[in-house]
Amino acid sequence: MMQEKECTDIWRRYQAGKDHHNRTNMYTQAEKCHRFYEGDQWHGLQAGDEELPMLNFIKPICRYKIVMVAMNDTAILFSPMDNDPKKAEICEALTAFAAAQWEKGKLDSKKWAVVKNACITGDHYLYCFDERTPSESVVTDMTPRLKMRLIDKTALYLADEQEPNLEEQEWIIIAERVPVENVRRQAKDNGLPEAEIRRIVSDEADETQLGVTGADEVQTDSGKCTSLLFMRKTDGGVAFCRSTQAVVYQPMQTIRGLDVYPVCGMRWEEKMGSARGVGVVERLIPNQIEVNRTLARRAICVKRYSFPTVVYDQDKLLAPEKLGVVGASIGVKNLNANPVGSFVQYLSPAPISGDAANLQAELVGTSRELEGAGEAATGQVDPTKASGEAIKAARDQSAISLNEQSAAYKQFVEDLAMIWYKLWVAYSVRGLRLADGTLLPHAELEALDIDIKIDISPIDPYSVLSRELSLENALAQQHITFEEYVEALDDNSGVPKDKFRAILDRRRGAAPEQSESGAGQNIGPGGAAGAFSPEGALPGMELVGGGVPGGLPGTGMPVQGGAGLFPGMGPAMA
């Protein structure tokens, strides 16, 4: 009886959320935004066999904005709030563990999906969970198994749609379409009686699932049903259960110590008095519709009036239908001395005003300029005619209008990192085992007062090139050694970092052998065995960087512009 009441209560809250979304036209608007972005901009129009033209300027605008926000290498950095070396060591281990979790969870791919969908519809969400059950199994399995799942805005239901902070929500519901067999299997694993399991039946997909209808689903014997994940905060932690319309198939349970909802989201642009965001597509749809209509009218006008129209005397021509056939022979009655032009003539096409074309170009150009994605921002740059720094400066200048979105993405990653930390603490009751086998005690992990920072580094080619040039200049001016230069190179650099490392490793391995073979021998006049001094240098050698001839400190490698190793040979490196 309690389960039926709880189920009815959860479904009632879900229905209240659906009613709100329908009143605000969220389902229809979100689907419309996706259709316009994808290019289905004449949806629902009955045009017969006619394929109407379309000029999709929304997609390049969105893609430019998405790339400018998401095209950065993201790293999560944990640090303690005080100077305790023990806590700093734990935070360093958590930072490395978070980097591994980022790769394992394919967050480089998921972040693009979050930013893209937030740009299109206004907001998008990520649900995090640990595959381990919060029971005794966590004691034996101390390695976290975090999973992340993307959640559409139409699948998330909030207790207060005017509160933008998810942590202030009384409850959160995530709706999804799940095969009935899977739900029944989970219900059986949770100990539900057979009578309750039989009440789990399929239902029809409605407008709540973005882009999904009953006709789109694969028709199986048991079908699919709507499953609701219900979450709310309690004094002990976050409590959750799963329910269908008639059955709570996963009873309410509480994750002790988890004081944040395992859901984080990104809002593209804030909307006054709303927990949801505003995307780019929604405000561009009216202009896009007018551009397409103008283009269609121009195309129809060109078809009708831009080509000559034939006029003929139907009493004189034997086969007038052949006038449009190339190379056809046409018979004429009573030609006599009358010219053919008196039987057949062509009407010259009327001139078409250029106002329609000008209006179309103005709509597209103005829309792009107002969105900060005009030709000046998205135009192609010839890298052979501009330096990497100049290109990077131009790109950064054009991205100023996206500072709000960049900050929203950074906040999204910070929220995700905090959720990870809270999940690690909540599930690791006997300690957290890292990838290298290190076991972090639960007490020390829980006592951390951490500060989360997000390091975002541009990874576009021009930013990488700019960093490479800076390192090369520092190397040429002998401010750094060659080893430091190699270690400072980016992993995605065009410079062969791995090959340079291999060369340095071989040199380090060969150095002891050279020392042993040179023992007991003088290097030069006045030089001691196994040592090198300026007096012991060969004639013509130039000592650079602490006693290494013609090279950088400790490397034995000559630098650009330095003297050759031997007189008369010229520079060692051109």
Image (tube, grey):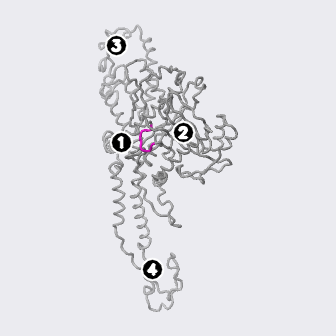
Which residue sits at x=44%, y=91%?
337
Residue 574 x, y percent position in the rendering:
33, 31
Q: Which residue is mark 1?
A: 404
Q: CA distance from mark 1 to mark 2?
A: 31 Å
Residue 163, magenta (yes or no): yes
Q: Which residue is mark 2?
A: 230
Residue 304 x, y percent position in the rendering:
44, 73
Q: Which residue is mark 4?
A: 310
Q: Which residues are magenta?
A: 160-166
- Amino acid on which disc 1 is placed: Glu
Label located before the other in sequence (4 or 1)? 4
* Numbered disc in front, either 4 or 1: 1
Which residue sits at x=36%, y=37%?
463
Question: Few, some or many C-alpha atoms within 10 Å of disc 4 (few <14, some 14-19, many ≥20)?
Answer: few
* Numbered disc in front, either 3 or 4: 4
Q: Quadrant of the N terminus?
A: top right
Q: Secondary structure at mark 1?
A: helix
Question: Few, some or many C-alpha atoms within 10 Å of disc 2 (few <14, some 14-19, many ≥20)?
Answer: many
369 over 187 or under it: above or below: below
Q: CA distance from mark 2 to mark 4?
A: 72 Å
Residue 94 x, y percent position in the rendering:
46, 25
